[in-house]
Amino acid sequence: MNNSKVWYITGSSQGLGLTLVKKLLENGYRVAATSRNAQALKEAAGVIDTKRFLPLAVDLNNVDSIDKSIQQTLAAFGRIDVVVNNAGYGMAGTVEEITEQKIRNIFDVNVMAAIDVVKSVLPVMRKQRSGYIINIGSVAGFAGAPGWSVYSATKAALAAFTEVLSLDVKEFGIRVTVVEPSGFRTGFLTKDSLAYTESKIAGYQAVKETQKHYLAGDGKQPGDPEKAAEIFIELAKNEQPPLHLYLGEDAYNRASGKLAAMTSELEKWKLTSISADYK
């Protein structure tokens, strides 16, 4: 099988990113995949086909490193059709107990890295007059849970960025989607992937109970990474993909419940809202 589209995927050495890389290669696509360690990525993917697979060592906190990887992809494959900003990690804890540096670090990876990848690839896609960008957000960016305030803030920022980006680049034939999953059976909740700060402050019961529930669910999440990868491939074929795609039944239920609550509150306070204008 020979598919002509070229995919560029960040955060590809494990979890959903690695599953997507393998699925794409199985289906004949050409794939440039980034990780902090290209050799570890190559071994994880288990692929030797250098004609279709380009593992790249990229520091996503370094714009020059990102730019270099985009140029390496173009040199190898001649174009970039689909970008998946998958790199990111979770952070759990109360905001007053997470250090400022840790908060800045997660914004650098979950938000700034994605923006920098987009900035680097847009000139390529504008020249092509085509392209598709998938930003991996989270349902937590719209309907979060206690103890995930900082993580939710990063994913809300990514969703808002995606929404306006789609308006900015539509005229160039570039499509954009933010995929907002609930729990998928990846390494997201493992100690190596999750920045977890245990609360030592008295109270915060909702936070502590929710954290216990989430940590106990590691490896039992209902989301299937294989099915998610297949959905991404189908999205890239669609000429009118959704701007927002909530992935997983829990994501759908949480988003629909939040929308209903927002609509109710909006109408309840309508008179107050409109009273703020000059008359």
Image: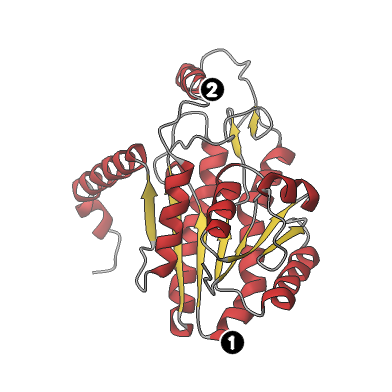
Asked whether, in this view, residue 237 is left or right of residue 214, the answer is left
Image coordinates of residue 141 in percent, x first then y, are 46, 46
Image coordinates of residue 261 in percent, x first then y, are 25, 41
Residue drawn where x is 64% and y is 71% of the image: 119
Q: Which mark is residue 127?
A: 1
101 in relation to 271, above or below: above
Residues 271 and 153: in front is 153
Asked whether, in this view, residue 235 is left or right of residue 275, the answer is right
Mark 1 Cα shell of 10 Å, populated few (<14), some (14-19), many (≥20): few
Residue drawn where x is 40% and y is 32% of the image: 222
Number of marks: 2
* For marks 1 and 2 on the same chain, the one whose residue lies earlier in the sequence: 1
User: Given the current orientation, which residue lies at the most extreme top position?
Assistant: 202
232 in relation to 105, above or below: below
**Of the residues shown, which amino acid type is indicated by label 2?**
Leu
Asked where in the image residue 166 lies, by quadrant, the reply is: bottom left
Residue 275 visible (yes or no): no
Residues 166 and 79: in front is 79
Colouring scheme applied when the structure was drawn: secondary structure
Asked whether, in this view, residue 84 is left or right of residue 56, the answer is left
**Of the residues shown, which amino acid type is indicated by label 1?**
Lys
18 in relation to 79, above or below: above
Element type where label 1 sits in the image: helix
Image coordinates of residue 70 in percent, x first then y, are 71, 71
Determine whether label 1 and label 2 are within 8 Å by CB: no
Asked where in the image residue 58 lies, by quadrant, the reply is: bottom right
